[in-house]
Image (tube, helix red, strand yellow):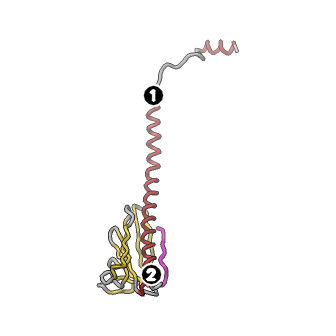
Amino acid sequence: LCQFIRLHKMLGVNFMKRRLDHGFSIVELIIVIGILALLSAITVPIGLNIFQKQQVARMEQDIENILKKAQNNAIYLKNDSDWGVKISSNAFVLFQGSTYGTRDTSSDESYNLSAGASYQTNYTGDEIVFGKFSGEPFEIINEQKTVKEGVGAVTISSGSISRTINIAKGQMIYQTIN
């Protein structure tokens, strides 16, 4: 042990010497800041993507539930009537009747949509009506019920995330993920 200590003294190493300088060097600070910037650059886009997916999924679920409720009310002959959904920018109205203009206002149910996502539909106008008993989807053109040709769709999107609710003749409402 003594020879080990003598050897280190000759080389200038002192085990008992304490470092008197305190704090971090500028190089250490730059390295830490660089690591934090790199982690932020990676996690912020991932977090934003997750947030957009949640917004779209929440709005898609809201719209799908409203459409299914209208379709089920029509199929199960609730009040022996057609049932429909009126689409506006931030709310949907579930209504009883062949058109929104001729509806029974006492049966209206209004639903506010989740904020943060937008939607588009391939229906003419802003109403989707389901025929009583059949549940067949119709679009309203000039206040007249018209059979929707092909598959009707409501697409919800936020950023690069989108989901589509399909409304097909003779089928229940279903969704696809884009």
Say which of 134 and 10 sits in front: 134
Query: In the rendered view, does 32 fall on the left or right side of 94?
Result: right
Residue type of the residue flagged with mark 1: Ser
Task: Pick whichever, 131 or 149, lies toward us.
Answer: 131
The residue sitting at 48% across, 72% down in the picture is 175
In the drawing, does residue 49 fall left or right of residue 97?
right
| Mark 2 nearby-residue class (10 Å; few <14, some 14–19, many ≥20) | many
Residue drawn at x 37%, y 74% is: 109
Residue beneath disc 1: 25
Q: Which mark is residue 48?
A: none
Answer few, some or many: residues within 10 Å of disc 1's Cα (few below 14, many 20 plus, some between 14 and 19).
few
Residue 127 vs residue 69, the one in the foreground: 69
Single out the residue that lies furthest toward the front.
106
Question: In screen coordinates, is 25 left or right of 11?
Answer: left
Alpha-carbon distance for marks 2 and 1?
Answer: 71 Å
Q: Position of residue 152 (x, y in %)?
A: 41, 78
For the record, the magenta segment spans: 170-178
The residue under label 2 is: 73
| Secondary structure beneath label 2 | helix
Q: Position of residue 28 (x, y in %)?
A: 47, 31
